Image (cartoon, rainbow, N blue to C red):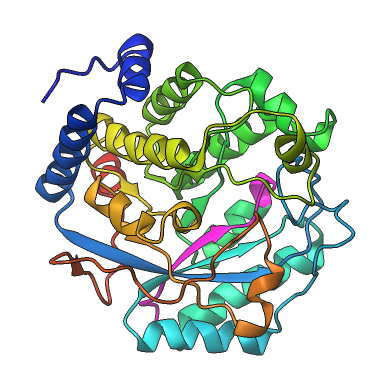
Amino acid sequence: MYKISPTISGLTAALENNDREFCRKLLSEAGTLRDRTVGGKVYLRGLLEISSICRKDCFYCGIRCSNGNASRYTLSDEEIISASQFAFKEGYGSICIQSGERCDSDFTSRISRLVRAIKDISDGSLGITLSLGEQSYDTLLEWFEAGAHRYLIRIETSNPDLYARLHPQDALHSFDRRLNVLQDLRSIGFQVGSGVMIGLPFQSCRDLAGDLLFLKEFDIDMVGMGPYIPHPGTPLGKECLSALSIPTAEERLSLSLKMVALLRLLMPDINIAATTALEVLDPRGREKAIAAGANIVMPNISPARVRAGYDLYEGKRNLTESPALGEIEIGYNQWGDSLRFKSRV
């Protein structure tokens, strides 16, 4: 294996290196390291997308509040509990409750109630990850005390200037606020997850190298990162489809797999998701990410009637099946918590 320096320059060079043999060895070594550190099992997180209503107006997201063509829905309590029961009976071990961002008291108290109910129906054995956007310290603490133990909020990019180009310039879309929420999650006791988009306009390999080092320096516990896929109903997507240049689908797939592999080499004991966005670019995208060091898969368990409504990016696939994993073992009925988190606490 070529030696890769864990520095901005070293990681940038690795991301820019498209030599076929280099890439093969990089991905293979990361997969081997995954097996040696966190084990050969892949853990399931049943993805439950409970609402497409969002107060944010991010320029890249299909459910941004200004998208008048977005399909808006909110699942009932009964639908959420039923999907959770399905995950529990199928041995998923954990679910991930995801939604557009809301901070009103009706929403936050409902989440607390649902988390407690899901814990009750599974006798406390179903792990719960939340991915519900930026919330106050008190709300996050309430959800933690209700029984959620992992929280995912993607930084999208660690470059503040690039972040500013992806969001409206107002207090609701603050880079510093996003960082503060990550700090709040850590202080409360959550397993903290984050991630970035790969192949954005204006983004360089040096930016991506900085993202990797940000995740390492923050000592993140779990990561979900995948390729940027333009949505035609968003300002950024429209620009990409008309004027802005982004890497080709093949290039974004390659960059995404290298990001997974490099992060595994940098942080051997964390959880890394094989994100469904990869399969928009390649039907075997999740499978390839697992081979490159990922160890989490998130099958969609949302009711079929609403899956098209959670339209984050164009071509989003609502995959219920796990990818072909070869000889990889699935960790049924296990939380599959981050070993990095366990060693820290």
Identified at 40% across, 27% down, the residue is 212
Rendered image quadrant of residue 286: bottom left
Q: Position of residue 31 (x, y in %)?
A: 18, 45
Tell me the quadrant of the picture where the N terminus can be found.
top left
Above or below 227: residue 145 = below
Q: Position of residue 35 (x, y in %)?
A: 13, 50
Rendered image quadrant of residue 322: bottom left
Identified at 52% across, 50% down, the residue is 152
Residue 10 is left or right of residue 152, and the answer is left
Furthest residue to the top? Answer: 9
State yes or no: residue 128 in magenta: yes
State yes or no: residue 230 in magenta: no
Task: Report the magenta residues as a range.
Answer: 123-138
Q: Position of residue 198 (x, y in %)?
A: 51, 36
Rendered image quadrant of residue 81: bottom right
Of residue 93 and residue 190, the one placed in the foreground of this image is 93
Residue 345 is left or right of residue 53, and the answer is left
Tell me the quadrant of the picture where the C terminus can be found.
top left
Residue 104 is left or right of residue 287, and the answer is right
Of residue 219 and residue 50, the one placed in the foreground of this image is 50
Above or below 53: residue 6 = above
Identified at 75% across, 50% down, the residue is 232
Q: Position of residue 53 (x, y in %)?
A: 78, 63
Number of disc labels:
0
Of residue 167 and residue 68, the one placed in the foreground of this image is 68
